[in-house]
Image (cartoon, rainbow, N blue to C red):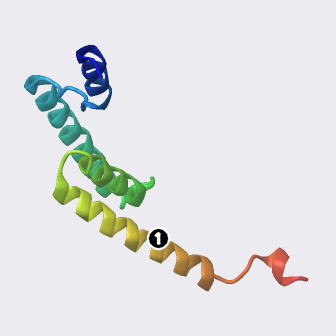
Amino acid sequence: MTATERAESDAETAPAPARPAPVRMLRKIAVTIAGTGLIVAGVAMLVLPGPGIVAILAGVGLLGTEFPTARRVSVRLNGYARTAWHHIKTKLPRSRTASKR
């Protein structure tokens, strides 16, 4: 293998270059602001009309893209939400059209 072939092979398997520090910091700040905003809006929607739980889950999920602790919370909350949804689907009586058969 020639030096050129080795360099091309290394270039194909090398990880993508890291973003410059200011860009990473701006992304982290933007994600923090947007995620916190979604959580605050979700909490407000718990008493106002709107999908409060969905907004809170979306905010925690967004924060989870940058913060490991938020990622763990997001995974746990999503598990609880899936379990609750499964219980709701299985425990609620069938619709009227299904009960007439």
Q: Nearer the viewer, residue 6 or 77?
A: 6
Q: Residue at x 26, y 45 (%)?
A: 35
* SS label for mark 1: helix
Q: Nearer the viewer, residue 95 or 58?
A: 58
Q: Is residue 60 left or right of residue 86?
A: left
- Please tell me in which quadrant of the rendered image residue 43 appears: bottom left
Q: Residue at x 42, y 56 (%)?
A: 54
Q: Residue furthest top?
A: 4
Residue 44 visible, this orientation: no
Q: Residue at x 31, y 25 (%)?
A: 9
Percent x, y of residue 88: 55, 78
| Residue designated by label 1 | 82
Q: Is residue 19 left or right of residue 56?
A: left
Q: Nearer the viewer, residue 8 or 87?
A: 8
Percent x, y of residue 92: 63, 82
What amino acid is labelled 1 in the image? Arg
Percent x, y of residue 83: 46, 76
